[in-house]
Image (cartoon, coloured by chain):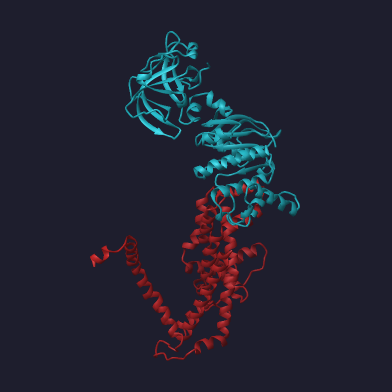
Chain colours: A red, B cyan
Amino acid sequence: MKHLYNRLSFQQKKAYWAWLFLAVPILFFAAVRFYPTINAAMISFTDWNLLTEGKWVGLANYERMFTDKVFWKVFANTFLYLIVGLPVSLTLAFVVAYYLDQVRFMHGFIRSLYFIPYLTTAVAMAWVWRWGYQPAPMGVINQILSSIGMPQQPFLRSPNQALYAVLAPAIWAGLGFQVIIFMAGLRAIPETYYEAARIDGIGKLATLWEITLPLLRPTLVFIVVLTSIGLLRIFDQVYNMTVDGQGGPLNATRPLVLNIYNTAFKDFDMGYATAQTMVLFLVLLIITLIQLRLMRSK
Amino acid sequence: MATVTIRNLVKRYREAEVLHGINLDIADGEFVVLVGPSGCGKSTTLRMIAGLEDISGGEVLIGDRVVNQLEPKERNIAMVFQNYAIYPHMTIYKNISFGLRTARLPAAEKDRRIRAVAEQLELTPYLDRKPGQLSGGQRQRVAIGRAIIRDPAVFLFDEPLSNLDAQLRAQTRLEIKKLHQRLGSTIIFVTHDQVEAMTLADRIVIMRDGHIQQIGTPTEVYDHPANTFVARFIGSPSMNLLPGAVTADGGLALDGNGPIAHPAARGLAPGSRVLLGVRADDLRVQSHTGATDKAPGLQLSGRVSVVEPLGPDMLVYLDAGLDAGTQQVIAKADTRQTLRPGDEVTLTAAPETLHLFDEQSGKAVAV
């Protein structure tokens, strides 16, 4: 063995050691990621309910999804979280990062104020926000509204407002992370680009559109992909802010992940739950690939 | 085109003053180079002229207009940066056109000008490419293109050649000089490289620690350095500075060596400490046996320690004087001379090539 190793070239020896060390995470990944994923894909073709041995039902679970009104509602909700949450959170994070980058006074303190929610457990925050949404005088938000002479809002009780009320703390929680990443991206742009623009008399807005944002593209790709995945998998906030964690009222806030959770652990319909999981997996995969392609190509 | 006038210009960062009230008059169409070691305030001065740094005190005038409070774009200047500052996500065409963004010109006229500038700088084949596909020298030409397309009153160059390799630097230097001859515009150029300063400038401004040391044409600062700093900074290799004292009879005695006659020493009190400056080019190296003539000027004996051939000539490093090893002297010698480390030689220099400085203040003593 030793004889054989000694006959390898330097390049081959390097590869040998690299693969030796890589083998550990690869085996780990295969055991806790790939195997369960493949197993879940298999279960999605059965009617396993934890108690009885599942039997093969072919595509029945997937056919059921097509006619399931709740599934489509949940599917739409999930995308609404993404379509509303992504632009709002990115715009907020960018504006905060853009101006925070220019502030020296108490810079670190302000930055940590934005970052703390990211470190706090989603459950605790969700309950604080749930409390805040209560009618006055219990709920802080409604109290502020009425004190400035505006009508109180139902928030979590309204099928029209609940989704946005749940989305708000989710955006708030992720903001700190996005701000940090945006600032790192902004800092990486050489100062002379801006100085050259000043000398050429390029306006602030034009500088932002034509210099800052295009040069931030790699950062943007990173944040868009991560945020999208996060929003499509929203769960904690919905589970903790809606009555009995059902994603109500009238399924108005229920996202796909919560639906999967309920199907699996309330209805014990493992086959149907894994089928939905497969759909979510595919959606995440496709969206991520599209985003990577779109934002890298130009 | 315009003159640039700097009056008592001061720059302070909080408590620290980095520029201590400098004065400079730049004529219309003049090529002025600010040169000095890092931290001397040359880039700060340039950036204050550009409007990228606030002015803490004094005035900057472009033409006869005080521009202290004007935005960079209102000063009618163009600037070329060390790292080029051309935008990597835009084509060369777009990059050059950026200089014309705010100009009120019809699109066709802008296009015509962009193509003309590209033609001048031999960038036409690259107009549709991105900067990433260009070499360092080509990128620097794009930056220059963006500057000249605006037809500004003053060009500012901030160490534009520092990121180029030696060969390209010499070539781009030449292009900038040709550009100046063609456009005839006022140029202020910052560099830490004295060779760039000497080759490009109509006038050189030598700076150190926020003060101007000397202003003059390349010949003036080379032949008549105002002080020991300028003497060492300008010219390569650096000027030799040999310590000595004025003798009772108005001559000069170098430490560890015999007395020599020097006209300037007559004006100084006997015993005054001085530095005698002599350039490597002005020293003659003679092997000991041949050195019989007793010419006026400097005569110095020494031992060769290192020889550096440069091609046409060679640099000879010598341990000179009686206490050998205390004083290193550099001389230039013809490569036809055969010199080896350890050889005993005599160095001579004509009296008119010698410079005299006050040891205390470093200031030149007038001849």
Q: Nearer the viewer, residue B330 or B312?
A: B312
Q: From the viewer's perspective, is A95 left or right of B277? A: right
Q: What count of labels does the image hold?
A: 0
Give the farthest residue toward the top: B249
Q: From the viewer's perspective, is B277 left or right of A214? A: left
Q: Residue at x 57, y 49 (%)?
A: B138
Q: In the picture, residue B201 is in which quadrant?
A: top right
Residue A140 in view in this figure? no
Q: Nearer the viewer, residue B82 or B13?
A: B82
Residue A192: x and y in percent read 57, 47
The relative height of residue B118 versus residue A57 in the rendered view (above or below) is: above
Which quadrant of the figure contains the N terminus of chain B? top right
The relative height of residue B193 versus residue B342 in the rendered view (above or below) is: below
Residue B342 in view in this figure? yes
Q: In the picture, residue B12 is in which quadrant?
A: top right
Q: From the viewer's perspective, is B29 left or right of A283? A: right
Give the farthest residue toward the front: B336
Residue B287: x and y in percent read 37, 22
Q: Residue at x 51, y 55 (%)?
A: A184
Residue B274: x and y in percent read 44, 18
Q: Residue at x 40, y 76 (%)?
A: A34
Q: Nearer the viewer, residue A95 or B99?
A: B99
Residue A44: x and y in percent read 46, 85
